[in-house]
Amino acid sequence: MPSERGADVGRRIGVGLMYGLWRPRVLGAWKVPASGPLIFAVNHSHNVDGPMVMGVAPRPVHFLIKKEAFIGPLGSFLTGIGQLQVDRHRADRTAITRALGVLEQGGVLGIFPEGTRGEGDFASLRAGLAYFAVRSGAPIVPVAVLGSSERRGRLIKGLPPLRSRVDVVFGEPFEAGDSSGRRTRRALDTATEHIQKQLADHLENARRRTGR
């Protein structure tokens, strides 16, 4: 199982890096429950989105990260700070078991529900988020990262301009399923539709609030 202590170390490292390199503005962190299982559903338009959330979130986070990132020293580092590798091209039972284990132990699981980097608008969701939420009963907290894809003023390709502002907006927790615990295809499809609406509404509100 991923290490909770490792995730806390990762959070401490993230705090230093994110606030040292950029100017994060965190909104709504008080909405995040202080304890109990939780799923962060994060929009994804840039490589820095995951580390940014890890660094500014009020609780340590275990992110599901594509296995291609777990290579050499970086792979050992990610494992050491409690992150989970997942094969996006098949039903990765090991990753599923470990992710559910995080929730069973009352931890925070971080998911990019779009599956990969894109427009970061939650327009295309995979069923994985609904499965974890319905199976575990853990509430979902929508998280919008805005400003990370800014291109003007970049000194390093692939990173936001140094010392630029990046907004991280946490939303209200919500339940994905109907409390029945059913994991049929229809139940997961219904949960996915509900999740997508909640995430899209949060993103719209976050953009309005931040002027992004």
Image: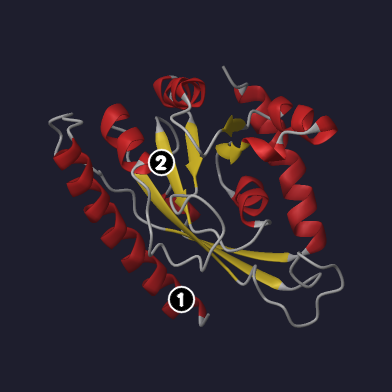
Please give the name of the residue rendered at 32% of the width and 67% of the height, measured from the top-left corner: 201
Please give the name of the residue rendered at 48% of the width and 36% of the height, measured from the top-left corner: 109
Quarter holding residue 183: top left
196 or 11, nearer to the observer: 196
Please tell me whether mark 2 sits on a helix, a strand or a loop: loop
Give residue 138's position: percent from left, percent from top: 33, 34
Give residue 181's position: percent from left, percent from top: 18, 29
* Residue found at the very far top of the displayed protein: 1
Please tell me whether mark 1 sits on a helix, a strand or a loop: helix
Q: Is residue 59 above or below residue 80?
A: below
Q: Earlier in the sequence, mark 1 or mark 2?
A: 2
Label 1: how many Cα within 10 Å (few below 14, some 14–19, many 20+): some
User: Which amino acid type corresponds to the residue marked 1 in the rendered image?
Assistant: Arg
Quadrant for the N terminus, please: top right
Which residue is label 2 attached to? 33
Which residue is label 1 attached to? 207
Mark 1 to mark 2: distance in Å? Answer: 23 Å
Q: Is residue 46 above or below residue 177?
A: below
37 or 186, nearer to the observer: 186
Give residue 36's position: percent from left, percent from top: 40, 30
Please give the name of the residue rendered at 35% of the width and 60% of the height, measured from the top-left corner: 199
User: Which amino acid type corresponds to the residue marked 2 in the rendered image?
Assistant: Pro
Label 2: how many Cα within 10 Å (few below 14, some 14–19, many 20+): some
Quarter holding residue 157: bottom right
